Amino acid sequence: MKPNPDFGVAVIGAGFMGGAHTEALRRLGMKVTGILDVKPELSLAAAAKFGLPHGYESFEAVLSDPSVNAVHITTPNKLHHAMTLAALEAGKHVLCEKPLAMNSAESGELVKRAAEKPHLHTGVNYNIRFYPLNIEARNKDLGKIHSIIGSYVQDWLLYDTDYNWRVLAEEGGALRAVADIGTHWLDLVTSISCLTVESVFADLKVVHPIRRRPIGEVETFKSTADLELKDVEITTEDQGSVLLRFKGGATGVLWVSQATAGRKNRLTYEIAGAQGSMAWDSDKNNEIWFGHRSKANESLVKDPGLLSGGAASASSYPGGHAEGYPDSFKQCFASFYGSIFGDSVSAPHASFADGHKEVLLCEAILKSHQEERWVKVGE
């Protein structure tokens, strides 16, 4: 992708995700006009930290800046809907962090409004699609899919003293582990398999009904050690399992947890079909396994010289040179801006429609857990 030097991007939110977006945009060669935090002085501090020209004083200032053509929204979930609507009305392209909105009414409205402005490009940052070997997996023909199983596990909320805005339903939504990381898994396996989840059966658990909240806020993955704490009630799940039925007859199982000691950020999947199977582990993200019944199994290590077209173009480094989490952001953004600039892309980025489907899935999963039954998506 060849960047347009006159095309400016502003990042909304200066936390963990804001930093990840800023770094990836700059590595891609995009012009980042500035960054916005919750207070003007924090915006200035973030701009200085990242070496950006502007620390915006308000979202209105971002939208009125003629040098800003697109915005990346990396704020707490409750702000996604209103900010995205305002950005579209201001004529800005929008890439929003997941989940797209707090509920399907909001996400459905965003899909509709985006469709009314076809000259604007929109997307949701499901970056895990863009590990090169996950793009390679999209091109693998396993025949009719029988099953998809896997997990996404972390440990950053293992202790009752671990805290972040994401644990609060009013900030992040009624679901947390499923919405925060489970949707990454669901988006990934459905984009690879081209299958659609039809119905779900979920069993979720709040490991810590009471957490000890620090006075003030804590950035994602940061420790609360040495901070003054107070008790706060938690209703969002720390872990859970979801049975899946896909259209066409395939079945699946997802395990999600943010309280699994030692697992910092591990996503795994195994997809089994009539002609073979394949498995990937984000802890070993430069390797994918292909299983066979009647010949030796295969293990493919990332090497653009051995990968198919899209996967090869998403590999910025030659064989033997590992690529990882930050690179997946860069490749996702290359797809998003490549679609704006009319360039070829390695794989499609997640659309607002994809983001809406994930919100519908979350609502079905929550309803299934509450009512202890199978629930059709969109019911």
Image: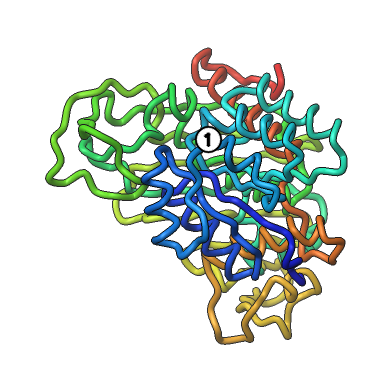
Q: Nearer the viewer, residue 148 or 292?
A: 148
Q: Is residue 207 left or right of residue 204?
A: left
Q: Residue at x 21, y 44 (%)?
A: 224
Which residue: 56% across, 17% down?
A: 367
Pointer 1: residues within 10 angstroms few (<14), some, or many (20+)? many
Q: Would residue 6 be found to the left or right of residue 176 on screen?
A: right
Q: Residue at x 22, y 35 (%)?
A: 160
* Residue sitting nearer the eye, 205 or 316: 316
Report whether 234 appears left or right of 374: left
- Quarter assignment of residue 106: top right
- Residue 366 x/y as whole percent: 53, 22
Picture coordinates of residue 339, whole percent (x, y):
81, 57
Q: Quadrant of residue 321?
A: bottom right
Figure quadrant of the C terminus = top right
Q: Which residue is mark 1?
A: 179
Secondary structure beneath dot 1 equals: helix
Looking at the image, residue 289 lies above or below residue 266: below
Vertically, is 270 above or below 166? below
List x then y, in percent, for residue 328. 59, 63
> Measuring 61% from the left and 27% from the top, which residue is drawn there?
82
Amino acid type indicated by mark 1: Ala
Colouring of the image: rainbow
Name the image quarter holding the N terminus: bottom right
Q: Is residue 255 visible?
A: no
Q: Is residue 346 visible?
A: yes
Total marks placed: 1
Q: Is residue 278 left or right of residue 38?
A: right
Q: Nearer the viewer, residue 144 or 188?
A: 188
Splitting the image into 4 quarters, where does residue 238 fall? Answer: top left
Residue 297: image x %, image y %? 65, 74
Query: Which is nearer the eye, 355 or 47?
Result: 47
